[in-house]
Amino acid sequence: MFHSCKTPEVAVEKLIELYDAACEHARSALTRGHAYDNVVYPKLIVEVMEWKPIDRTVAYGYVDNVGRYSSAISRPELMRDYLLEMLEALVDNYPCKIEVGPSNIPIAPEYIDGAPPAQGRSDVPKPTLDDIDDAIVDGAWTAFHGDELPLCYFTPQRFDIACRRIEHYTGIAIDSVQKYILFTNYDMHTSEFVRYALTELERPDSRYTKLCLPNGLTVSVGEAAANGTQLDLGSAYQMPRFDLCTARGDGITMINIGVGPSNAKTVTDCLAVLRPECWVMIGHCAGLDARMRIGDLILGNAYQRRDHILNDRIALDIPIPAVPEVQRTLENAVLEVYGENQDLMRTGTVLSTDDRNWEWHTHSDLWQILRGSTAVAVDMESSALAANGYRYRIPYGTLLSVSDLPLHAVPKLPAGAQAFYSSSKEAHVMCAVRAVETMAEAPMKLRTRKLRRAIGEVPFR
């Protein structure tokens, strides 16, 4: 039975009610041996009754035609604010009818918090990759040519497996992931971030409420001074995550994703379902210009993709543009942290490779690799993070620090690298932190039309 909902608020509350009831029924059925029936995701339907021209500057909440738009939804309580904002945008722009009811998609117990094991019951659905793909994100023909068009980018099964994998890789539940995400591949950056977080939590006027650590510990306001010198920042997980939280969820998450473009794709494939406002890479790179110095900053404004990680999703002839709203904010943050002297920073193309020892070639081979390129830096992760941000319509940016100059007789060696790390880590992290804090003050400025497609687009952000 579907319920007509007069307002977005009513619709979101009904989604939560139906989802919670289905999960509670599942837990009861598995505990007591009852039939595992009616355990399905709720479905949201928006029927756009009349098309009309709208504000041409909006980045979401628009459609090309009248019709029925629908999606089955998982974890509506977690996504409450997002769903409410998206529905309000639609109903503000067009005359709409909203309905909520049960879908025909069963929820596997592995995706339900607190559900006991199914213990081999044949009537209980199993999680299967057959139901998980990115057809909507990648604009598959069939995803946009049915009787009902998609409202959002992800199916509920895709959402659920992504959430479970975030927990698997980072060690803590998804509930505290914030809307602004920093990626690094150095423990020293996460240590600096934690140091900053503890300082903030000691301030009586701080907007932050707690710090969630990958070992499961949470440090709240008022506890920072007592715990700051005793924290164990070690983690048994592949991608340790640190969440500096606000009451509205618009704080900062930092994740040490390790090395390589595959890791970068893996983590962003998962985080994308939570619809963050922005993600930024802060890492190190090889400088390609003899005028550079160790510690110079590179603000990536273009990406040369030699990492091969997303070539089958985004063709190499499709440009990955810089996002000006992110670029300007990062540049201003560098100015704030380093002062008026901007000689140490330059914008330019970042070449990303999947070969850590890319420079171990003959001079003639390197000449051929770089011939015609305007790249000023080489790293491994930035292009994958930017390309997946482009793909998932999530604003992205890159702020790298030059750690070696391999073409100019300054290779990365232990002694020099450690000295560089020690002198640069705090300022580098603080540039990124200041930037995303500025973005959080005016998130609508990030709601860019530049990442939206001409075809294969959904109404929701």
Image (tube, rainbow, N blue to C red):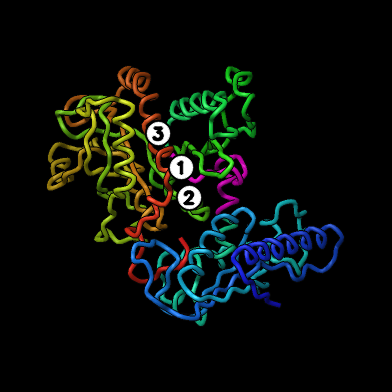
Task: Find out whether residue 305 is within the magenta segment.
Answer: no
Q: Quadrant of the N terminus?
A: bottom right
As rendered, which of 254 and 9 lies closer to the eye?
9
Q: Which residue is mark 3?
A: 434
| Percent position of residue 306, x then y | 28, 49
As rendered, which of 377 and 444 lies closer to the eye?
444
As rendered, which of 116 and 441 lies closer to the eye?
441
Chain part drawn in magenta: 162-182
Q: Which residue is mark 1?
A: 181
* Mark 1 and mark 2 residues within 8 Å of each other at the beta carbon: yes
Q: Disc 1 on helix, strand or loop?
A: strand
Q: Which residue is mark 2?
A: 276
Q: Residue at x 53, y 34 (%)?
A: 207
Q: Quadrant of residue 457?
A: bottom left
Task: Nearest to the eye among marks 3 and 2: give it.
Answer: 3
The three-letter amino acid code for the residue at tag 1 is Ile
Q: Earlier in the sequence, mark 1 or mark 2?
A: 1
Q: Earlier in the sequence, mark 3 or mark 2?
A: 2
Residue 163 in view in this figure: yes
The three-letter amino acid code for the residue at tag 2 is Pro
Q: Earlier in the sequence, mark 1 or mark 3?
A: 1
